[in-house]
Image (cartoon, rainbow, N blue to C red):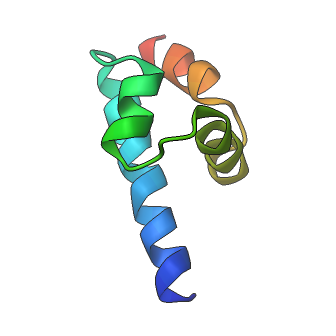
Amino acid sequence: MTVSEYIQDRRIRLAGELLKKGDATISMVANTVGYGNYSYFTEQFKKHFGVTPREYQKNAKE
């Protein structure tokens, strides 16, 4: 794993933790972890978790 891949992994994992809490919008979470582009954030999140951020947040609430 390269340094860049490690940083990306940490950012996406942090986003997952923040989405589980449910008090922030997805765009706020994306910005918090350093993704200015919502579409790119969604793409990277889905690659890592296999679901979109919205689906992930919904499943975490259930």
Furthest residue in direction front, as rendered: 36
- Residue at 70% x, 34% y is 51
- Residue at 69% x, 42% y is 46
Residue 25's image quarter? top left
Tell me where residue 26 appears, x and y as whole percent: 46, 23
Tell me where residue 35 appears, x and y as whole percent: 47, 46
Label total for image: 0
Q: In this view, does 4 lie above or below 34?
A: below
Q: In this view, does 62 lie above or below 21?
A: above
- Residue at 55% x, 76% y is 5
Residue 56's image quarter? top right
Front-most of 37 and 58?
Answer: 37
Horizontal relation, residue 37 to residue 47: left or right = left
Horizontal relation, residue 51 to residue 28: left or right = right
Screen quadrant of the N terminus: bottom right
Tell me where residue 6 appears, x and y as whole percent: 47, 76
- Residue at 36% x, 26% y is 28
Tell me where residue 8 appears, x and y as whole percent: 50, 65
Front-most of 37 and 51?
Answer: 37
